[in-house]
Amino acid sequence: MNWITNYVRPRINSIFSRREMPENLWTKCDECGTMLFHRELAENLNVCGNCDHHMGITPRRRFEALFDGGIFAEVPVPMPIADPLQFRDQKRYPDRLRAAQKATAEPEAMLVAEGEVGRTPIIAAAQDFSFMGGSMGMYVGNAIVAAATRAVERRRPLVLFSAAGGARMQEGILSLMQMPRTTVAVEMVREAGLPYIVVLTHPTTGGVTASYAMLGDIQIAEPGALICFAGPRVIEQTIREKLPEGFQRAEYLLDHGMLDRVTHRKKLREELISVIRMLTHQPPPVMGDLPAPGTPEETAAPTSAPAQESAEK
Amino acid sequence: MNYLDFEKPLAEIEGKAEELRAMARGNAEMNVEDEARALDRKAQDMLRDLYKNLSPWRKCQVARHPDRPHCRDYIEALFTEFTPLAGDRNFADDQAVMGGLARLEDKPVVVIGHEKGHDTKTRIERNFGMARPEGYRKAVRLMDLADRFRLPVVTLVDTPGAYPGKGAEERGQSEAIARSTEKCLQIGVPLVSVIIGEGGSGGAVAFATADRLAMLEHSIYSVISPEGCASILWKDAEKMREAAEALRLTAQDLYKLGVADHIVKEPLGGAQRDAAGTIKAVGAAIVSLLKELEGKSPAELVAGRRKKFLDMGARGLAA
Ligand SMILES: [Zn+2]
């Protein structure tokens, strides 16, 4: 049997499996330098087995590990008008976009999906740092509005994984306007009485932290994630002093009262299930690696009966 | 008078006229008025030419001109019974943000704005108009007050951006900005905002998420400073002219993009040449924009504001 079918659990689409065929079998941990075998690393959700450093993970990979049986349906995100400012620096913006699309095989910097985690229906949105630094432009704004709208329509909690260097400069003021725009989206979810949970991942900086990424009912961060408005280099230049060890890292923010929790990526799924089910008055979760919803074993097992919210499907 | 680099030729002519008149004051025999007047006319023409088509970078310079009227000047001239209200009830009172109760044409309002200061001492006190978390939290508190007592809110935006400092980050700068923007979207009273100089990124959004946004003719509003953008995208901070051009940060472009709702004309040569005239024009704009919102219910205001921001960006510059 081909090893790849073994480890790529769900087969959402074949393009994905093809693309995931690794070119390099070994990845060097950028924290401790240990060489990590790709298969082991993937199994470990891109967390270094030696030093626990949390490396970047694409939204698709994250969702595969998050949703029951790795099954999720993408929520469509409308494409905004292209290059609204006709922006050009050393390269034309459309060229930069195309290069990012080619490199990631994704249309833009955010993926929105619906599915079940621990038999708990949710909407999830994840920002893709590998796509132009995850930068927040009109597409990311559209994605968050689409996620919020779907959450309200289906009466499902929204879980958002942030990762971004900040706003997309090439969209100028329109990227800045995604701060109020995404805030409206958060308001919609809140007004519907639904939980909005933010998971801040490395790095989440700039305008993203100053809008939707800081407005969660529950704020969780992955260990070691850099979370800030102004970056450490800018601050050092401004105040001309050395910043303390761990400044603006998840643990530092936790100490300063800016987060609810710092949670290891491998424990995140269970924690999200548990928190969401408590906030929405659902019975205790069935933990573990659940198969995709609707499979025969599930229908046979009354203990994993879906909660009322999932009855609509 | 502080001259900007591109105003140097103007400085020479105006200096000459001034010099002639000074000489004549000491000598009754001398008649220089004709010559001085000719120089005045020349200066006037030059000023018109210079300001007719200011490049985006020059607009940034004008927007940051130290002689432009600042928040405090507007509050003193336009409002009566201004009663500053201080503090965030949590940590401190941020001097970069002024705010309080006041009357505009006898009607009570809450006014909030960034104040940059006008000399070395006040600039340092005011932190050059760069708010810390306390500033946004004070604004949130004042907006809540306005909401509770049904008072319209007027914000005057003039900031290079949020303060990149250690304490500001430790005390949750991002969260403070996010909550202020959120509060702008939540209040059930009219919110009119004017960018009177610099609208620097998140620090500006936190106050400018308004029902109506007016911008002074030579003000700017941008996701990042041209210098910052140049150093990231061009890897050279000296490319700020190119960056200013590319960012489309002028009031005129923002009006086309639907971000600004109204442009307030500045006197010839910019607000710094006629503070009183500028303040008067801004006052008239605020009054008329508030009038547009009169009679709307809190629910209508909130829904309208949400729609405004949800729809934003639907058209580009080409439209
Ligand atoms: Zn490691």
Image (cartoon, coloured by chain):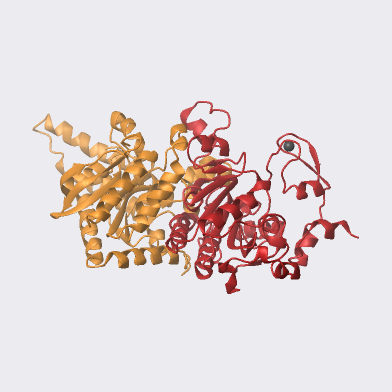
Task: Residue A103: give x, y in percent of width and height.
Answer: 71, 56
Compared across the picture, whether A250 is left or right of B14 comes to right
Task: Residue B267: give x, y in percent of width and height.
Answer: 25, 52
Farthest residue in the front direction? A302
Instruction: Kindly tell me whether residue B45 is visible in this rendering.
Output: no
Instruction: Kindly tell me whether residue B165 is visible in this rendering.
Output: yes
Residue B306 or A265: which is nearer the viewer? Answer: A265
Residue A165 or A204: which is nearer the viewer? Answer: A204
Q: In which quadrant of this rendering is ligand 1 seen? A: top right
In the figure, A72 relative to B10: above or below? below
In the figure, B1 relative to B265: above or below? above
Chain letter, orange = B
Write the residue at 65% across / 59% down. A118
Task: Residue B78: give x, y in percent of width and height.
Answer: 18, 49
Chain letter, red = A
Task: Residue A273: give x, y in percent of width and height.
Answer: 60, 55
Farthest residue in the left direction? B28
In the figure, A204 relative to A244: above or below? below
Quadrant where the N terminus of chain B sits is: top left
